[in-house]
Structures are given as C-alpha cells and as structure tokens.
Amino acid sequence: MQKTAIFYFIFCLYSFLGANLSIPQPNEKRYVDDLTHSLSAPQVSMLEKHLQVLDQKEGVQLIVVIVPSLDGKKIEDVSQVFMTRWQIGFHGRGSGCLLMLSTGDKSCYIELGYGLSGWLNEKSAEKICHDTIDPYLAKGEVASAAIEGVKAIFTALQVDFESGEGFENNPWWGKASLLFCFVNVFFLFLLARFSSSRFWWLSPSIGFAIGFTQSIGLAFVLAAFAGVMVGLSIILRRRFTR
C-alpha cells in the first residue's frame, strides 16, 4: 500500500509538471528547435544537415531544443517531459538524445535514450555540458554552445561530425552493453528467488549498483525489477510453506 502511494505521488507530480510546461508541438521535419532565435538560419541549416545524416546512417535521433527560460523548474525534469512528449528516438531501440539549452538560466542538459548506454552515459553527458557547453553559455554565446555541444555528442557517439560515419567498434560495444543488461537481470532474479527473506534488500541494492555503472535511470530500473522479484518470491514462499 505504501509503495502504491509513492508511485501514485510520482505519477501525479510528473503529470502536474507536464501540464504546467508550455511545450510546443514537435516538428517531425526538424532536428533543431530554437525557441529563442539565437541561431542564424545558416547555423540551423548546417546542424539540421548533420543531424539528419546521423539519424539516417547511425539510427540515432539527436534533437536540439533551445528555450528562453525553465520557469523555475529543473532542466532535468523539463528535458524528460520533452523527450517523452516528442517521442524522441522511439524507433524501437530507444536511440534518442535530447540536447536542451536554457538561455535565461544559462544551463544545459543531455537526456539520453537507453539504447545509447554503450556509447554515452549520464556521466559523460554531464562532462560535455560542464566542459564544452557551459563556458559558452556563461558568455552568452548560445550558438557556439549548441554547435560545439552537438560536435561533442558526435565524438562521444564515435561518429565523425562531417561525414556522419561511425567507427567500426560501435556495433560490438552496443551488443556487449545489451548482453550485460540481460545477464544481470537473470542474476538479480536468481538472487531474489533464493536469498533469505531477511536479506530482501540485497538484490535491489546490487541491482542499483550494477545499473549505476551505466546510468542512474538504469540503476532505478534494475533496483525496481529486483524489488518486484523479491516481493513475488516472498509471497510464493509463504503460500507454499503453509
């Protein structure tokens, strides 16, 4: 009952956030939505060309959104709502990426789809914001922040910015990351199934730690999965021991 109340609270909070954000309708033909008009037409056209090539050749949909203000909200929350509402990268692989810049707040955030975990995780995304984008935003050079930020993301994805061609080791690492997730899900299931009831916290904790090596989102997913498995195991044990 307590867990249900917590999940309901989070759902209501997310719904409230989305309802109070002024989110424009996505333009499916564009990869750059500059709501502040900080980029010139040639700069937008240049980014659009490279981002389209990235989408077509590598299957990675990178969207750039520049907003004037966050209206006092966290940029992480705003980015997540944009990512979900616009269905960025939802081609069946979750290979979407949102680069959001707020000129009024001089802040940036990179929201990642789960399919990019083999190339780009939250730590490297934060490093791109801190090392590459933030210095330009601090000086008010929004166009440079967006362009250099996109180039840094291309580099992290191991894709050449000019040609849009990926390096040869990309597919191998992506498959290895996917295999890593499947193996650990099976491991967490076994741990939850056969561990003692008094150590119920062990499987969710290990799941969180394993997922955290990739991203904070995966950490919570694996922890939640392990928690559900622990709950089901305890229920089944009690039923069959009666």
Image (cartoon, rainbow, N blue to C red):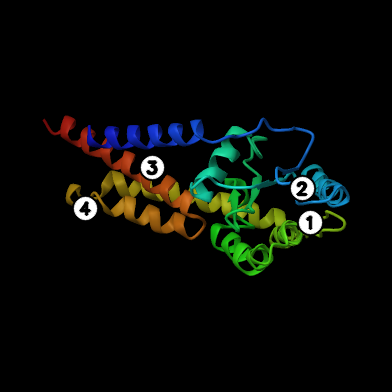
Q: Earlier along the polypeptide chain: callout 3 or callout 4?
A: 4
Give how far apart the Cα atoms at labels 2 and 3 are: 30 Å
Give how far apart the Cα atoms at labels 3 and 1 are: 33 Å
Residue shown at 59%/39% (left/top)? 82
At label 3, counting other C-alpha atoms closer than 10 Å, the crowd grade (few under 14, some 14-19, many 20 or more) is: some
Circle 1 SS class: loop
Left or right: residue 197 versus residue 10 is: left
Q: Earlier along the polypeptide chain: callout 2 or callout 4?
A: 2
In this view, the residue in front, 142 or 224, is: 142
Q: Residue furthest left?
A: 242
Disc number at residue 58? Answer: 2
Circle 4 SS class: helix
Residue shown at 43%/52% (left/top)? 219
Disc number at residue 71? Answer: none
Residue beneath label 1, please?
A: 166
Circle 3 SS class: helix
Q: Amino acid at mark 3?
A: Phe
Q: Earlier along the polypeptide chain: callout 4 or callout 1?
A: 1
- The answer to the question of whether label 1 and label 2 lie on touching residues, with beta carbons closer than 8 A, is yes
- Image quadrant holding the C terminus, namely top left
Disc number at residue 199? Answer: 4
Give how far apart the Cα atoms at labels 2 and 4 are: 44 Å
